[in-house]
Amino acid sequence: MDLGIKGKVALVAAASQGLGRGSAAALAAEGARVAILSRRPEELKLTASGIGAALAVPCDLSRPEDIAAAVAKVQAELGPVEILVNNCGGPPAGTFDSITEEQWMASFQQVFLSALRLTRAVLPGMRAKKWGRIVNIVSISVEQPIPGLIISNAFRPALAGWAKTLAAEVASDNILVCCAAPGRILTARTATLDQAAVEKTGRTLEEIRKERVAAVPLKRYGTVEEFGAVVAFLASERASYVTGSVIRIDGGAVSGI
């Protein structure tokens, strides 16, 4: 299927690894001119070379001045952003009693405000072209809270609610807004959470993962390539009647309808 995005300018946040990299790689494979952001300059360069990204821009998503400068650079070198993939690193794991107020505030900047700031920066260009795609990488925690991830359980649903409202506000300009909700996708973040469970319980990594995939009907973790393919579709011309939706990429793990 031709997704109809060859030559489109795409900006993917937090794309040096994991879900961001998978999304950027899928968009680049479809011929989009992809700019990637990350606060890890060396990994960013390697990723850009590995996936054929058109531009790599160092950017700390917690700093509004970094976001403004990064978007300005992308638009100066590639043109107005037509596809935006909002993404960020996962917030700290923990329970209510273990999370500090400083961690709550930092995570709000990272998870929620970074998406708002990036979107605000690119919307004028999308409106001018009467075409745009905004895909927000969230989590299945928007529908089913995940034990031990209280920050994610709070801010990911907030982001999905914002996206749903925004979708209605910009639909008349042919700008579509969706959320991609990953379940257990094998990334560095997943590996970190699995290892934390090993250290907390004293069980082996094999035991932890066997237990976790048992809750997934497909009985395995997903790959970043599988996730990226869904993001590329949501960002495409073929998804022209899909907006305001949360699309799960979870192997069937969420028990709700």
Image (tube, grey):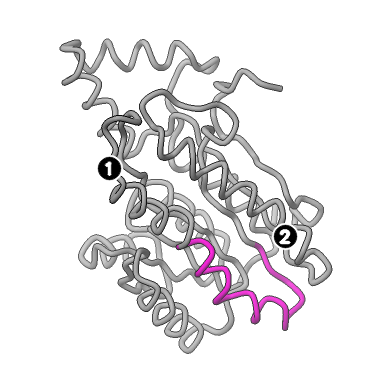
Q: Give the side of residue 102 with respect to residue 15, left or right.
A: left
Question: SS at mark 2?
Answer: strand
Q: Position of residue 176 (x, y in %)?
A: 72, 60
The one of 158 and 255 positioned closer to us in this rendering? 158
Q: Residue at x 72, y 78 (%)?
A: 127
**Within the image, what quadrant is residue 9 found in?**
bottom right
Q: Position of residue 121 (x, y in %)?
A: 54, 76
> What type of secondary structure mainly makes up the magenta span?
helix
Task: Residue under label 1, please give it.
Answer: 100
Q: Residue at x 43, y 33 (%)?
A: 185
Q: Position of residue 162 (x, y in %)?
A: 63, 54
Task: Residue under label 2, please give it.
Answer: 176
Q: Is residue 123 magenta?
A: yes
Q: Is residue 208 above or below residue 179?
A: above
Identify residue type, mark 1: Thr
Q: Give the side of residue 198 with respect to residue 127, left or right.
A: left
Image mark for residue 233: none
**In the rendered picture of this protein, how many numbered marks are placed on residues?**
2
Q: Residue at x 70, y 51 (%)?
A: 164
Question: Disc 1 vs disc 2: Cβ atoms closer than 8 Å?
Answer: no
Earlier sequence position, callout 1 versus callout 2: 1
Q: Rounded to the nearest whole Å, what is the CA distance between mark 1 and mark 2? A: 36 Å
Q: Position of residue 195 (x, y in %)?
A: 22, 26
Q: Is residue 221 above or below residue 216?
A: below
Q: Quadrant location of the C terminus?
A: top right
Q: Which residues are magenta?
A: 114-133
Question: SS at mark 1?
Answer: loop
Identify residue type, mark 2: Leu
**Within the image, what quadrant is residue 69 found in?**
bottom left
Q: Residue at x 59, y 53 (%)?
A: 232
**Is label 1 or label 2 in front?**
1
Q: Is residue 2 above or below residue 101?
A: below
